Image (cartoon, rainbow, N blue to C red):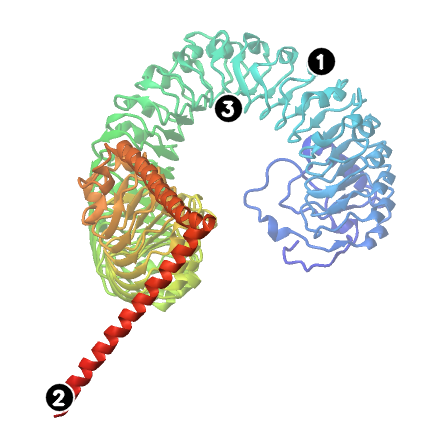
C-alpha cells in the first residue's frame, strides 16, 4: 500500500486470493478473532477485505519504525461496488483517511458481515441506524473517529450476536437508550466506551441493572463519570478487566467487591482520597491495580493479603502512612513484580527496617520510590530483593553513603537511578560488582573523591551519569572498555587532566557531556567517537585550534558545544560540511579571523553562537542559506560592515544579537517585515546611524529591543506601542517544534537597573527596551505607556524633550526606569507613584520642575542623585523644599486670617452701600416731600448757573482783548 494513493473512491478487493488474514487483533479479543477469520476464510465464498494500515496495530503499541502516513490510503468515501462481495464476512479499513465522509448506509446489505473495523478512518456524521441490520455482526469497531456521533442507540440492540463493541472517542453524549440498549445484548464480551462524553447523559437514561453476565472487559475511562452512573453495571460475574481511569470518582461502585474474577483494575486519575477503598480487600484475584494520580494518604495493612498482585501503582498520591511499613507489605506480596510509589510523601519510618522477608523467593523486579521524603539512608531490606532489576529513588532526600552490603546483593540490577539526593562520601569500588548494570544515574548528589576504576568493569553499561557532584581526579584512562556506552555525563564536577585517548574506542557513544570541569587538552589531540551526536565541552580549559578536518572526525554531530574554553585560531570551513549540525557554540574563546562564508541549504543549523571571540570581517552572506536558523549570536567581536540582504531568508529567526561590534550604516527597514517571530533584537554598541525605522513596530513578538550606544537620530517611532510582545505578560513563546529546551541554553546580556546583567535560564521572563546613548530627539511617545509588560525602559543620554508621559504609571511591570541626561521639562507625572515594582529610577539632568511625587514605592528610592541636575525640582529626597513648605506650620492660622479678611471686606462694602443709600434719599426725599425747598433749590441752581455763565463771558472777553493787542503789537 502506498501513501501516495490518489484521492477518490476506494475500490473493493479483487478476491480472496489477493488479501491476507490479519495477524494483529484489537484488544483482548485478538486471538479469538484471528481464529474466527481463519475459519471463515477456509470457505472462499466468505472472503475477508483487509485494507488496514500495516502500521496501525490491532493491539499493543505502534511499531516504532513503521511510517504510518506512508501507508495511509485516502478516499472520498467507500465505493458501493463493495456490495459485489456478497459473502463478505470481515471488513477492516482502519488507519486510513476517508476525508470525514459518512459511514455508507449501504453497508447494511452485507448480511454475512461478522467483523467490521473502521477505527481511526476519519469518518464523521451520525452512525447510520441501519447498521442494526447486520444481525450476524460479532465485532463492531468505530473507535477513534472523533467526528462520529450517535443520538439514538436502539439500533445496536438488534445486533443480538455482538460480542465486541469498540467506540472510543465517538460522541455519545446525546445517545438515546444507551444503557438500555447495552442491557439487551447479553452476548457482549468487551465494551470500550473511552472518552465518549457519558457524563452528559441524562439520569433518566440510567437503568437499575444490566444483563452483562458474559462481559469480561469494560473501559469507561475519560468520561468524567461519578459513582452513581456505575450502579447499573452490576451482575458482571465474568468481568476480568475494568478501566475507570480519568473520571471524577471518589468512591468505588457498591458491586465492585463481588467481582471475584477481576484481575486488572485501573482507577488512576480520579478524585479518591483518604485510605484505599475497603472494597478492594475482597478482590483476591487481582493481578494489576493502578490507583495513581489520586489523593490517597494511607495504605492499609490488608493490601498485603492480595497475594496474587503482580503490578501495583500508587504513584502521584499523598501517601504518608503505610500500615505496618512498606517492608511488611513487600514481605507479604511475594509475587509482586512492579511497584511504583513515586511522588508521594513517604518518610523513612514508613519504609520500615525489616531485615527478613517471609517470601522464599521475591519476584519484585521494578521498584520506584522517587520524589518522596525519606530523609534517611537506603533501607537495608533492599538487599533481599534478589530479582530486582530496576531501582529508582531519585529526589527522595536519601542521605549517607552507598552501602556495599546492600548494593552488592542486587546481582540482577540493570537500572540504578539515585539522582537528586544527598548522598555523600566517595563512590565505593564495590559498584563494579553490579555486572548486569546497564543504566547508572547518580547525578546531583554530593559524592566526592575519584571515579572508581572498577566502573570500567560494568561492560554492559549503556548510560552513565555522574554529573553535578564533587568528583575530582581524572577520567579513567581505560574508560574505552565500556564498549556499549551510548551516554556519558560527567559535567559539573571537579575533574582535571586530559580527556583519555581510549574515549575513541566507545564506538556506540552518542552523547558526551563533560562540561563545567577543569579538563585540559589540545582540541586537535582529542580522538572522538565518530557516532557522537551530542558533544558538550563548555567551561573547561580546552586549548589549541580546531582541526581543519573536523567534519571527518565528527560527521554525525548535531550539538557541538565548545564555549568558554581557550580555543584559538580560525573557524574551519569544514564545519559547513556537517549536514547534521544543529547547534554550534564556540562562544567565549579566542577565535580570530573571518566567519566562514560557506554555509549551505543542506544544513539544519538552528543555533549559531560565536559571541565573545576576536572575529573580524563582515557578517557572511551565506548565513542566509540557513532557513532553519533561529538563534544567531555574533556579539562582542570586531565585525564591521552592514547587514547582508541575504538575512531576509531567515524568517524563523528568534534572536539576533550582533551587539558590541563595529557595524555601521542604517538599520534595514526590511527587518520589520521579515522577522515576524523575532523576540530578541540586540544591536547595542555599534556605529549604526540614521533613524529607527517605523517597520520595527511590526515586530509584534519582540520582548527585548536594545539599540543603545549607537549614532541613531530622529524621534522615537510614534508606533512604539505596537510592540505587543512588550504589552502583555505572556512569556516568550516558541511555535517551532522541539525548540523549547534551547531557550534555557541561550545567553543574552541586558543593561537594566544601571548595570549589565546576564540572563540565561530566566531569559524567557525578561522584557526590556533600551534606546539609550543615541541622538534621539522629540518627545517620548505617549503610546510607549501601553507597553505594560516592560521590566526595563532606558531612554537616557539622548536629546529628548517635552514632558514625561502622563500615563507612565500604566507600565505596572516596570522595575527599572532611566530617563536621565535628556531635555525633558515640566512636572513629573503623579502617576509614576503607582509603579509598585520600581526599584531603579534615574531622572537626573533634565529640566524638570515642581514637587517630586510621593508614594509607597517612591519613598524607598531616597537617593537625591535620582533627581540631580534638575534645579527646579523640590521636595523629598532633595534638600530644597517646595515654597509651601516654609509656611507649613502656620497653615491653619493663615486659613483663619483669610476667612476673617473676607468677612471684613464684606462689612466694608455693606457700610459704603448703606451710606450712599441714606445720603441719596435724605437729599432727594426732602426735595420731593417739601415744595418750597424744591423751588428754593432749583432757584439756587439757576442763579448759580447764571453767575457762572456771566463770569465765563467776562473772562473770555478779557482774554480776547489781550490776545488782539498782542497780535497788533507783533504786526507793528
- For label 2, the SS is helix
Q: Position of residue 928 (x, y in %)?
A: 46, 50
Label 3 sits on residue? 316
How busy is the neighbourhood of tag 2: few (under 14 within 10 Å), some, or many (20 plus)?
Answer: few
Q: How far apart are marks 2 and 1 (CA)?
A: 157 Å
Q: Where is residue 740 in the image (x, y as percent from the top left)?
A: 43, 44
Number of numbered tags placed on the structure image: 3
Task: Please report whichever mark, 2 or 3, sits nearer to the chain's N-terminal start.
Answer: 3
* Residue 468 found in image quarter: top left
Determine whether, in the image, residue 249 is placed left or right of residue 940: right
Position of 888 relative to 691 (above/below): above
Tell me whether the residue at label 2 lies in contact with that at label 3, contact meaning CB atoms closer than 8 angstroms. no
- For label 3, the SS is loop
Label 1 sits on residue? 258
Q: Where is residue 761 in the image (x, y as percent from the top left)?
A: 34, 40
What residue is at 32 percent from the left and 19 percent from the top? 402
Position of 320 relative to 762 (above/below): above
Amino acid at each position: 500500500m502506498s501513501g501516495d494513493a490518489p484521492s477518490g473512491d476506494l475500490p473493493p478487493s479483487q478476491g480472496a486470493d489477493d488479501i491476507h488474514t490479519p495477524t494483529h487483533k484489537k484488544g483482548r479479543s485478538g486471538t479469538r478473532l484471528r481464529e474466527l477469520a481463519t475459519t471463515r476464510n477456509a470457505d472462499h465464498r466468505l472472503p475477508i477485505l483487509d485494507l488496514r494500515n500495516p502500521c496501525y496495530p490491532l493491539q499493543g503499541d505502534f511499531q516504532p519504525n513503521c511510517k504510518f502516513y506512508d501507508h495511509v490510503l485516502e478516499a472520498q468515501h467507500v465505493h458501493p461496488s463493495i456490495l459485489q462481495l456478497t459473502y463478505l464476512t470481515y471488513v477492516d479499513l482502519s488507519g486510513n483517511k476517508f476525508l470525514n465522509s459518512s459511514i455508507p448506509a449501504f453497508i447494511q446489505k452485507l448480511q454475512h458481515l461478522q467483523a467490521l473495523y473502521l477505527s481511526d478512518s476519519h469518518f464523521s456524521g451520525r452512525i447510520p441506524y441501519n447498521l442494526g441490520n447486520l444481525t450476524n455482526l460479532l465485532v463492531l469497531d468505530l473507535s477513534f473517529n472523533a467526528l462520529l456521533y450517535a443520538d439514538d442507540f436502539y439500533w445496536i440492540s438488534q445486533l443480538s450476536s455482538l460480542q465486541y463493541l469498540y467506540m472510543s472517542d465517538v460522541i455519545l453524549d446525546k445517545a438515546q437508550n444507551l444503557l438500555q440498549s447495552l442491557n439487551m445484548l447479553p452476548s457482549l464480551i468487551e465494551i470500550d466506551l473511552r472518552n465518549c462524553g457519558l457524563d452528559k447523559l441524562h439520569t433518566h437514561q440510567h437503568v437499575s441493572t444490566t444483563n452483562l453476565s458474559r462481559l469480561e472487559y469494560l473501559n469507561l475511562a475519560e468520561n468524567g463519570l461519578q459513582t452513581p452512573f456505575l450502579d447499573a453495571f452490576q451482575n458482571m460475574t465474568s468481568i476480568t478487566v475494568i478501566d475507570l481511569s480519568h473520571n471524577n470518582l471518589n468512591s468505588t461502585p457498591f458491586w465492585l467487591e463481588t467481582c471475584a474474577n477481576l484481575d486488572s483494575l485501573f482507577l488512576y486519575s480520579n478524585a479518591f482520597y483518604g485510605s484505599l477503598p475497603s472494597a478492594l480487600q475482597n478482590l483476591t484475584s487481582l493481578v494489576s491495580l493502578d490507583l495513581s494520580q489520586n489523593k490517597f494518604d494511607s495504605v492499609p495493612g490488608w493490601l498485603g493479603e492480595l497475594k496474587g498482585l503482580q503490578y501495583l501503582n500508587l504513584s502521584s498520591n499523598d501517601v504518608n502512612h503505610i500500615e505496618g511499613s512498606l517492608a511488611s507489605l513487600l514481605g507479604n506480596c511475594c509475587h509482586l513484580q512492579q511497584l511504583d510509589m513515586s511522588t508521594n510523601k513517604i518518610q523513612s519510618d514508613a519504609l520500615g527496617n525489616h531485615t527478613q522477608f517471609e517470601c522464599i523467593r521475591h519476584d519484585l523486579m521494578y521498584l520506584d520510590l522517587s520524589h518522596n521524603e525519606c530523609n534517611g539512608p537506603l533501607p537495608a531490606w533492599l538487599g533481599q530483593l534478589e530479582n530486582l532489576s530496576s531501582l529508582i529513588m531519585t529526589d527522595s532526600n536519601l542521605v549517607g553513603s552507598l552501602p556495599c552490603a546492600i548494593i552488592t546483593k542486587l546481582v540482577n540490577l540493570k537500572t540504578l537511578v539515585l539522582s537528586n539526593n544527598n548522598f555523600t562520601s566517595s563512590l565505593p569500588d564495590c559498584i563494579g560488582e553490579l555486572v548486569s548494570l546497564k543504566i547508572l544515574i547518580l547525578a546531583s548528589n554530593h559524592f566526592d573523591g575519584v571515579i572508581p576504576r572498577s566502573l570500567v568493569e560494568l561492560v554492559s553499561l549503556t548510560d552513565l551519569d555522574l554529573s553535578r557532584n564533587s568528583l575530582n581526579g581524572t577520567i579513567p584512562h581505560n574508560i574505552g572498555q565500556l564498549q556499549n556506552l551510548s551516554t556519558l555525563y560527567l559535567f559539573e564536577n571537579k575533574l582535571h587532566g586530559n580527556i583519555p585517548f581510549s574515549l575513541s574506542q566507545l564506538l556506540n557513544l552518542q552523547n558526551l557531556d563533560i562540561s563545567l570541569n577543569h579538563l585540559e587538552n589540545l582540541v586537535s589531540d582529542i580522538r572522538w567517537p565518530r557516532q557522537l551526536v551530542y558533544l558538550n565541552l563548555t567551561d573547561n580549559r580546552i586549548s589549541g585550534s580546531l582541526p581543519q578536518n573536523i567534519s571527518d572526525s565528527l560527521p554525525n554531530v548535531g550539538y557541538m558545544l565548545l564555549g568558554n574554553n581557550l580555543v584559538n585560531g580560525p573557524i574551519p570551513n569544514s564545519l559547513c560540511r556537517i549536514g547534521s549540525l544543529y547547534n554550534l557554540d564556540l562562544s567565549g574563546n579566542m577565535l580570530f579571523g573571518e566567519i566562514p562564508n560557506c554555509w549551505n541549504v543542506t544544513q539544519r543549523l538552528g543555533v549559531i553562537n560565536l559571541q565573545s571571540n576576536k572575529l573580524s570581517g563582515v557578517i557572511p552572506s551565506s548565513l542566509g542559506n540557513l532557513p532553519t536558523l533561529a538563534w544567531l549570536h555574533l556579539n562582542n567581536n570586531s565585525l564591521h560592515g552592514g547587514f547582508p540582504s541575504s538575512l531576509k531568508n531567515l524568517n524563523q529567526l528568534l534572536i539576533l544579537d550582533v551587539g558590541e561590534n563595529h557595524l555601521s550604516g542604517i538599520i534595514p527597514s526590511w527587518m520589520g517585515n521579515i522577522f515576524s517571530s523575532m523576540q530578541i533584537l540586540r544591536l547595542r554598541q555599534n556605529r549604526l546611524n540614521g533613524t529607527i525605522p517605523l517597520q520595527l513596530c511590526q515586530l509584534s513578538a519582540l520582548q527585548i529591543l536594545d539599540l543603545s550606544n549607537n549614532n541613531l537620530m530622529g524621534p522615537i517611532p510614534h508606533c512604539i506601542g505596537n510592540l505587543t510582545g512588550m504589552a502583555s505578560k505572556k512569556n516568550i513563546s516558541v511555535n517551532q517544534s522541539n525548540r523549547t529546551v534551547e531557550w534555557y541554553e541561550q545567553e543574552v546580556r541586558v543593561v537594566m537597573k544601571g548595570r549589565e546583567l546576564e540572563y540565561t535560564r530566566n531569559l524567557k521572563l525578561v522584557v526590556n527596551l533600551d534606546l539609550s546613548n543615541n541622538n534621539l530627539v522629540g518627545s517620548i511617545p505617549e503610546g510607549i505607556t501601553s507597553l505594560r509588560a516592560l521590566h526595563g525602559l532606558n531612554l537616557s543620554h539622548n536629546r529628548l524633550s517635552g514632558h514625561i508621559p502622563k500615563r507612565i504609571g500604566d507600565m505596572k511591570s516596570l522595575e527599572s526606569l532611566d530617563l536621565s541626561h535628556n531635555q525633558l521639562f515640566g512636572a513629573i507625572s503623579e502617576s509614576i507613584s503607582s509603579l509598585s515594582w520600581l526599584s531603579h529610577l534615574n531622572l537626573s539632568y533634565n529640566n524638570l520642575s515642581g514637587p517630586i511625587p510621593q508614594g509607597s514605592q517612591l519613598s524607598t528610592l531616597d537617593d537625591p542623585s535620582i533627581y540631580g541636575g534638575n534645579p527646579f525640582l523640590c521636595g523629598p529626597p532633595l534638600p530644597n523644599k517646595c515654597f509651601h513648605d516654609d509656611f507649613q506650620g502656620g497653615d491653619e492660622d493663615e486659613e483663619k486670617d483669610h476667612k476673617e479678611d473676607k468677612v471684613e471686606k464684606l462689612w466694608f462694602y455693606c457700610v459704603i452701600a448703606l451710606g450712599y443709600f441714606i445720603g441719596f434719599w435724605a437729599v432727594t426725599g426732602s426735595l420731593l416731600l417739601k415744595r418750597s425747598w424744591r423751588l428754593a433749590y432749583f432757584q439756587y441752581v439757576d442763579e448759580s448757573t447764571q453767575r457762572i455763565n456771566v463770569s465765563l463771558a467776562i473772562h473770555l472777553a478779557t482774554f480776547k482783548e489781550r490776545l488782539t493787542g498782542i497780535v497788533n503789537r507783533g504786526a507793528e
